[in-house]
């Protein structure tokens, strides 16, 4: 008997990407008058969290040596 393996990949925009696109659309259509920092904040926060995770992982790897 052969075992069938199913691989599932997730491709898509994600929640923060969608939220950022909605905010950009609202900003460009003058529905909201927020600063661009607030409009782009979902993406900026995501990038900051990913950077923090890599920084912590790097620190742990350096300490482990």
Image (tube, helix red, strand yellow):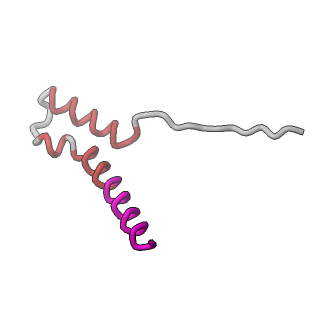
Quarter holding the C terminus is bottom left
Give the left or right position of residue 41, taking residue 57 as reference. Answer: left
Q: Nearer the viewer, residue 58 or 5?
A: 58
Report x, y in % for residue 29: 15, 26
At a point 22% along the width and 46% down the height, the residue shown is 41
Give the left or right position of residue 34, taking residue 3 as reference. Answer: left
Residue 58 is inside the magenta segment: yes
Give the left or right position of residue 5, taking residue 62 as reference. Answer: right
In the rendered image, the residue lying farthest to the front is: 65
Q: Which portion, as a residue range, is magenta? A: 50-65
At a point 28% along the width and 44% down the height, the residue shown is 43
In the rendered image, the residue lying farthest to the right is: 1
Give the left or right position of residue 35, taking residue 13 as reference. Answer: left
In the rendered image, the residue lying farthest to the top is: 29
Residue 20 is inside the magenta segment: no
Quarter holding the N terminus is top right
Q: Residue 14's quadrant in the figure?
A: top left
Query: Which is the main secondary structure of the residues drawn in magenta?
Result: helix
At a point 21% along the width and 33% down the height, the residue shown is 24
Report x, y in % for residue 58: 38, 62
Report x, y in % for residue 4: 77, 37
Report x, y in % for residue 8: 60, 38
Please state the total of marks drawn on the protein image: 0
At a point 81% along the width and 40% down the height, the residue shown is 3
Vertical position of residue 52 compared to residue 10: above or below: below
């Amino acid at each position: 008997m052969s075992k069938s393996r199913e691989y599932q990949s997730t491709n898509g925009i994600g929640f923060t990407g969608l939220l950022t696109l909605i905010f950009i659309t609202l900003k460009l259509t003058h529905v909201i008058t927020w600063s661009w920092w607030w409009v782009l904040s979902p993406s900026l926060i995501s990038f900051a969290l990913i950077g923090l995770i890599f920084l912590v992982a790097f620190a742990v790897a350096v300490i482990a040596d």
